[in-house]
Amino acid sequence: MKKLICLAIALAAITLPSAAGNARDAVKEIPERAGGVYYAYPVDGAVVDLGSIKGYEPFYISHYGRHGSRYLISDNDYERIINRLNDAHKAGALTPAGEKLRLQLDTIWEDARGRGGELSPLGARQHRGIARRMATAYPAVFAKGAEVTATSTPVMRCAHSMFHFINGLKDLNPTLDVPVESSLRHKIYLSYQSPESGAFDRNDGPWYQDYTRFKNSHTNPDRLISTIFADKHYVDMWVDQDAFMWDLYWVAVDQQNLDNGVDLMPYLTNDELYALWEVANFGFFARNSSYIRANGLHTDNAKNLLRHIIENSDAYIADGRHGATLRFGHDGNIIPLLALLKVEGCYSDAERPEDLSAEYADFYVCPMGTNLQFIFFRPTKGKGDLLVRVLHNEQPAVMPVANAGEKGLYRWNDLRPYLTSLAYAEK
């Protein structure tokens, strides 16, 4: 393949870390990475330019995208800590730092109230930016006569992400016609979850004992509590200290996804952020990825989606069409897909929570706005192999595919058997 391809790689200025292993250093460098799946996808950056492929032109893109940045999933996630601090304020039990935090949370609440789980303005900008870079890098895909379709789960943040993505495409091609649908009809491949995986994920599932042990050992709120509360007797009577620390953590790490200008990260030390992230990283991994004790239950959930990718690609190839299939869903859908495909850095065989962060970091695997793109190329003249460039978050996705070429570039005749072996495999 190296003889066929002239590949000049000039990656975009996207600041996602390239691997786990150095997760502690990565969090120290950018504390927002401690948000894990709440890490905000970068909006800005140079146009992604992975170089032209001599003698080839792009004609089809198969895409799956997680919704963009959002508010915390429920208003209750804000109200719990706000109510706790307001009660302590009335009792005169807050330190000056605690009073400052209470007022900052009031500012956050003015923005967040009634918007639990909704796409934030940053989430809209993320998807518009991804779409604009896609259309700029591969204009032939969206040229006159392009057949582009878009589907999302019926969850509003996914539908809104889809609409903003399409607007990004139309920024470059206003005449583009994109039929859209957001309904339960497509749930079978956009967001499938088997009853067996749902049962595994419950708090009585086999993962939960390890998770609880790990969480208890990594949650050390004494310093934080003494910083926020002035009255130890009040704390002993009324404050669940571990729960308070976790409530603050989630609000703090999600602030990067909002535009209200409030920064709560300084209330937690880097060591505290990293310890809490390790717990959250294991929790998301155990319930969504290649956790060995799940015996493939979660990666199996992605097989319908992978079949949809294969079948739609086959149809565009057979019909000689050009265009794109755009899909929008959740972290719980793209995380299993990346693990099923064994995209480098996106799966692990680790069983113990203590071992996971050396191999797997969810802020790399699935930040807000995560996307997977299969870009298909055909020869401009005569016959030849179809080529596919696979991108994870606009960076080359390396997979254990036979005869793989440079940095996420594959022959379809090599990639398709690999994909079908995963999509149709039975236990």
Image: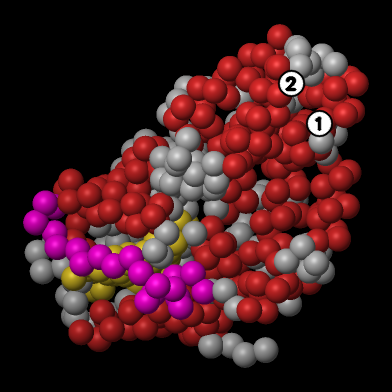
Q: Nearer the viewer, residue 222 or 1?
A: 222
- Give residue 202's position: percent from left, percent from top: 73, 66
Q: Quadrant of residue 302?
A: bottom right
Q: Secondary structure at mark 2?
A: helix
Q: Circle 2 sits on which residue?
A: 88
Look at the image and give the residue range highlighted in magenta: 173-192
Q: As shown in the figure, which amino acid type bears the numbered disc 2?
A: Ala
Q: As shown in the figure, which amino acid type bears the numbered disc 1?
A: Val
- Give residue 259's position: percent from left, percent from top: 43, 29
User: Which mark is on residue 239?
Assistant: 1
- Give residue 126's position: percent from left, percent from top: 37, 43
- In the figure, 63 relative to 379: above or below? above
Residue at 19 percent across and 80 percent down: it is 320
Residue 188 lies in the magenta-colored region: yes
Residue at 40 percent across and 79 percent down: it is 308
Q: Secondary structure at mark 1?
A: loop
Asked if one can make out residue 29 in the rendered structure from this viewpoint, the answer is no
